[in-house]
């Protein structure tokens, strides 16, 4: 599949469906080490983002889809996740602003820009047991796939696998950011809910392209 506007729309719709399906699971993860509302907030945000797709002009580019998603996530998702995800999609939009279709290099640039936005907004680094761990692994995997000559769809698939591995890798980590950091050792053994939702969102991007 060509990574164009149709793909970007399919990404957001797929992400909204997957988040809705797994909202309870995300809530359980967040109740273990946070305030328990991550699944509910993400579900509300991506449902709003899906509604925003109906307002896009006929000549919308992928960046328009990503920007509309960012604006709805910022306005609809409570807590820290709204600004973090909103910034990620906004930076991703800016990275591919002039593109009608995305090649492998564009996919890496888009994901790298999203990660940069999250790091800047949340002041987290890899190993802090946050969504940065999943996004960092995703960008690393995407960059390696692109360097190997993979096509953009394969690069997205690599990113999704990287994000899933990065999310799983948060299980044994001691948290250094957010509410989970107050739990200290008691948070060890629990997956970071933001990393888990990042893996869902990036898997949706890959599946929408398949």
Image (cartoon, rainbow, N blue to C red):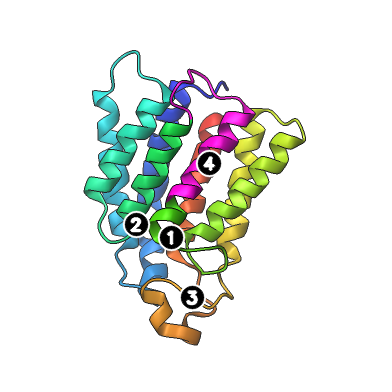
Span highlighted in magenta in the image = 96-117
Q: Which residue is mark 2?
A: 81
Judged from this view, the residue extending furthest toward the right is 148
- Counting labels gives 4
User: Which numbered disc flags the more N-terminal residue, 3 or 1?
Assistant: 3
User: Which numbered disc flags the more N-terminal residue, 4 or 1?
Assistant: 4
Percent x, y for residue 64?
A: 35, 26
From the image, give the main secondary structure of the stretch colored magenta: helix
Q: Which residue is mark 1?
A: 194
Secondary structure found at label 3: loop
Q: Which residue is mark 4?
A: 111
Label for residue 3? none
Q: Residue at x 42, y 40 (%)?
A: 91
Instruction: Tell me the crowding category of disc 2: few under 14, some 14 to 19, or many 20 or more residues within 10 angstroms, Cα based.
Output: many
In the image shown, does 100 or 41 lie closer to the viewer?
A: 100
Q: Are marks 2 and 1 in contact (CB under 8 Å)?
A: yes
Instruction: Tell me the crowding category of disc 1: few under 14, some 14 to 19, or many 20 or more residues within 10 angstroms, Cα based.
Output: many
Instruction: Tell me the crowding category of disc 3: few under 14, some 14 to 19, or many 20 or more residues within 10 angstroms, Cα based.
Output: many
């Amino acid at each position: 599949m060509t990574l164009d506007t149709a793909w970007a729309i399919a990404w957001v719709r797929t992400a909204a469906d997957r988040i809705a399906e797994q909202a309870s699971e995300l809530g359980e993860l967040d109740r273990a080490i946070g305030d328990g509302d991550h699944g509910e907030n993400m579900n509300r945000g991506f449902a709003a983002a899906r509604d925003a797709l109906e307002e896009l002009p006929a000549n919308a580019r992928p960046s328009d889809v990503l920007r509309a998603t960012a604006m709805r996530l910022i306005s609809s998702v409570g807590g820290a996740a709204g600004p973090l995800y909103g910034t990620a999609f906004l930076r991703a939009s800016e990275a591919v602003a002039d593109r009608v279709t995305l090649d492998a290099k564009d996919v890496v640039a888009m994901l790298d820009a999203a990660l940069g936005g999250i790091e800047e907004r949340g002041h987290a680094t890899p190993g802090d047991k946050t969504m940065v761990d999943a996004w960092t692994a995703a960008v690393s995997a995407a960059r390696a796939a692109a360097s190997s000559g993979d096509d953009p769809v394969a690069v997205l698939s690599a990113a999704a696998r990287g994000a899933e591995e990065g999310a799983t890798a948060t299980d044994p980590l001691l948290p250094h950011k957010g509410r989970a950091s107050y739990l200290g050792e008691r948070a060890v053994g629990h997956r970071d809910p933001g990393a888990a939702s990042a893996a869902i969102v990036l898997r949706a991007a890959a599946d929408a392209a398949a």
